[in-house]
Amino acid sequence: MTPPTAGRVRHPRAQHQFLGRTCSITGVGSYVPARVLTNADLEKMVETTDQWITTRTGIKERRLAAENEFTSDMATEAARRALQNAGVPAEAVDLIIVCTITPDMPFPATACLVQARIGATRAAAFDLEAACSGFLYGLEVGQQFVISRTCDTVLVIGAEKLSSIIDWTDRNTCVLFGDGAGAVVLQHRPHSHGLLTTVMGADGSRADALCMPGGGSRCPATAQSVAARLHYLRMDGRETFKNAVTAMHKAAQAALDRCGLRVEDLRCIIPHQANRRIIDAVAERLGARPEQMFVNLDRYGNTSAASVVIALDEAVQAGRIRKGDLVMLVAFGAGLTWAAAIVEW
């Protein structure tokens, strides 16, 4: 049996006489909290309007975790759903990677908490931090363990409780973000290209455009740092927008070129759900048709590392992605970081 895409896809690793095995997504799952915060709710909290938020971002509502609901809780539920979807018991997981900028605590890794919660007693576990690009970075890191035969089953999770680091008095940022988690199971699947390529990049010279100044070794928590609100997310919206569009487009085009594909060959494109204007600008530069783009931004806002994988799960559930389809995932985040991946489903 040959892969469904045989003859129309160039596997980038083939040129290096690749002797490993391929890595596929064999299960996906997601979780969002029950509480919904609408634009109308935000009108009562800060000086803003539903029209202002909608026209500038495309966001209508977002989900917020409960006070006693943490990143590890959401990651655990998403992981359980992904494992169930893949038909894989937790005991079979060899490695857990949690991609997040809002871990339960600086250490131990949130991945270790998830490991204990799901009963993955054989699994190694660590966290990965690349902000909104984190899940795609984690996808590439996870697949290395599968293709090298170091691991047979890897769980990659994107999970965020961004509401815990949002300044709810700052109308420029508090309207943008939400909480949630998504997870995928990575395994070798015979006769499938799986994850074809991932293009990753970073520009640390623009790190100040999107950051949380307080809480690390540079600025430990003090009464002064708390009073100065340094433990909340800060963003230069104009600088972030400009760099996001350019970086996502370049990464997406580079991924297509590596595989010898055109944008028309893609069944579905899942961009990071940060801002509708960013998504539309990237689609226009790529020459993508509106029906190729999957968008759930209006219901969840920006969930950082969870964004792409929550959308991936919903796209699969909605029948937008079927076996053999070519799917692009593309993201941009603080760092500044960016990534694009092409997957044969």
Image: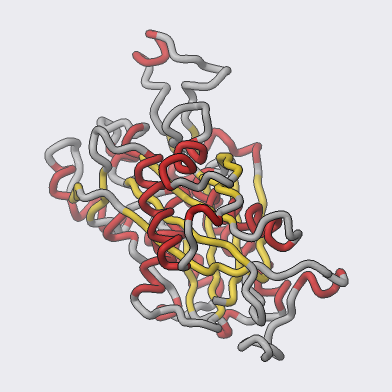
Q: Say left or right for 59 vs 8.
A: left
Q: Residue furthest right?
A: 17
Colour approach in the figure: secondary structure
- For the point 59% across and 47% down, the residue is 337
Which image quarter holds the N terminus?
bottom right
Reply above or below: 20 against 304.
below
- For the point 47% across and 50% down, the residue is 158
Reply above or below: 344 against 86.
below
- Nearer to the camera, 312 or 339: 312
| Image-quadrant location for residue 285 | bottom right
- Nearer to the camera, 312 or 62: 312
Which image quarter holds the C terminus?
bottom right
- For the point 20% across and 55% down, the residue is 51
User: Residue 141, image x and y in percent?
Assistant: 66, 52
User: Residue 53, image x and y in percent?
Assistant: 26, 51
> Taking the image as drawn, is residue 266 in sight?
yes
Q: Say left or right for 45 vs 277.
A: left
Q: Say left or right for 235 vs 146.
A: left
- For the point 51% across and 37% down, the residue is 112
Give the mark count. 0
> Taking the image as drawn, is residue 277 in sight?
no
User: Residue 2, image x and y in percent?
Assistant: 68, 89
Q: Say left or right for 261 vs 313.
A: right
Reply above or below: 332 against 46.
below
- Nearer to the camera, 73 or 141: 73
User: Residue 183, image x and y in percent?
Assistant: 46, 56
Reply above or below: 126 against 320.
above
